[in-house]
């Protein structure tokens, strides 16, 4: 078993304690929340009723039925009508089919979901006063007899979130000092090493050296591109294929997860990345009080798990 180790992020002032536990089965670190769904609000015909759901846009219509659908949030924390909490929230229903998770869709269907993310990202970024838009997914996993309907969320903000501003500034500092992109350099330095989960000619999948999440993974295009718009068709397919494989593997240990897409800020030319963060246990005093996180699964172990 690996010894515990304090690790610093590649280029951020962030630390994590990698403290591998002697686990017989990896699923012991997860306590999946119970999900109970009485009646699914994302299933037709409810979701198509403008009295019950805010209609935004239907995608991939076939015989009058949508393949992917975007709706508004009925009780949004942010709204374009509220100057005190200005912003926009949307929900992307990834499939008509109830009880199917995103990794159970075909690669082509996942590519369609990425295309909807791209279209919504562009539409929302054009709205007045919007500075940042994040696309993310919270997945609780399958629990009991009731299965939630697979969906992602998009939130647009009137501010650049401090965490993003901080990472952006750290990237600029790195570029000044090294004359190169930190993520392009991470791909070069990790290549062939014990944290490479998978790669092909387009996409590099890595368990980051100082991962805050057990089984955390980064998906990086090998080309230095700044935005989801810049992904070409083969890169999208490759990304969809690896995301499908890794989320399928994650289902073996029933891990709830988040993933989110980081596009470069408008005036910058930073590397596009999709980050997958299986949800750790509820953070305790150390994490809340210091921001230093204990990760009980080393990235090297996580890599072995995904490769296996
Ligand atoms: Zn449903
Ligand atoms: Zn780069």
Image (cartoon, rainbow, N blue to C red):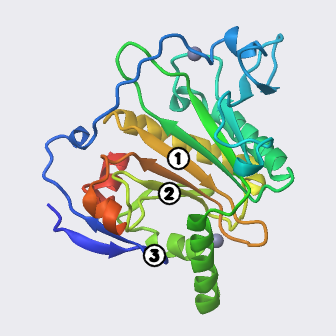
Residue position for label 1: 259
Q: Is residue 108 in sight in this rendering?
A: no
The residue at the point 48 percent across, 35 percent down is 139
Q: Quadrant of the N terminus?
A: bottom left
Q: Nearer the viewer, residue 245 or 117?
A: 117
Secondary structure under the numbered disc 1 in the rendered image: strand
Residue position for label 2: 218
Q: Is residue 161 in sight in this rendering?
A: yes
**Residue 91 in the image: above or below residue 50:** below
Along the polypeptide, which appears first: circle 2 or circle 3?
3
Label 2–label 1 contact, CB within 8 A: no
Marks 2 and 3, how far apart in space? 13 Å
Residue position for label 3: 10
Toward the top, the furthest residue is 45
**Residue 280 in the image: above or below residue 294:** above
Mark closer to the observer (2, 1) = 1
Tell me: is circle 2 under 8 Å from ligand 2. no
Marks 3 and 1, how far apart in space? 20 Å
- The residue carrying pointer 3 sits among few (fewer than 14), some (14 to 19) or many (20 or more) residues within 10 Å by Cα, namely some
Along the polypeptide, which appears first: circle 2 or circle 1?
2
Marks 2 and 1, how far apart in space? 9 Å
Count of residue discs: 3
């Amino acid at each position: 078993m690996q010894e515990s180790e304090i690790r610093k992020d590649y280029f951020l002032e962030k630390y994590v304690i990698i403290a591998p536990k002697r686990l017989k089965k990896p699923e012991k670190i997860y306590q999946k929340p119970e999900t109970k769904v009485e009646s699914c609000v994302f299933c037709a015909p409810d979701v198509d009723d403008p009295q019950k759901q805010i209609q935004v846009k239907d995608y991939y219509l076939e015989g009058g039925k949508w393949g992917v659908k975007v709706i508004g949030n009925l009780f949004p924390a942010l709204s374009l009508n509220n100057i005190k909490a200005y912003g926009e929230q949307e929900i992307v229903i990834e499939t008509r089919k109830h009880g199917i998770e995103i990794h159970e869709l075909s690669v082509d269907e996942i590519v369609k979901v990425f295309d909807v993310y791209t279209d919504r990202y562009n539409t929302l970024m054009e709205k007045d006063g919007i500075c940042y838009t994040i696309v993310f997914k919270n997945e609780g996993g399958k629990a009991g007899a009731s299965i939630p309907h697979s969906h992602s969320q998009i939130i647009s903000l009137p501010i650049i979130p401090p965490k993003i501003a901080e990472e952006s500034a750290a990237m600029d500092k790195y570029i000044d000092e090294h004359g190169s992109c930190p993520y392009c350099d991470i791909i070069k330095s990790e290549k062939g090493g014990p944290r490479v989960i998978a790669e092909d000619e387009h996409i590099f999948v890595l368990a980051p050296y100082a991962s805050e999440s057990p089984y955390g993974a980064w998906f990086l295009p090998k080309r230095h591109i700044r935005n989801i718009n810049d992904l070409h068709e083969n890169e999208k397919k490759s990304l969809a294929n690896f995301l499908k494989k890794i989320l399928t593997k994650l289902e073996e240990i029933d891990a709830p997860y988040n993933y989110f897409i980081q596009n470069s800020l408008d005036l910058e030319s930073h590397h596009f990345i999709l980050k997958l963060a299986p949800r750790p246990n509820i953070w305790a005093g150390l994490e809340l009080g210091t921001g230093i996180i204990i990760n009980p699964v080393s990235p090297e172990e996580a890599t072995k798990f995904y490769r296996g």
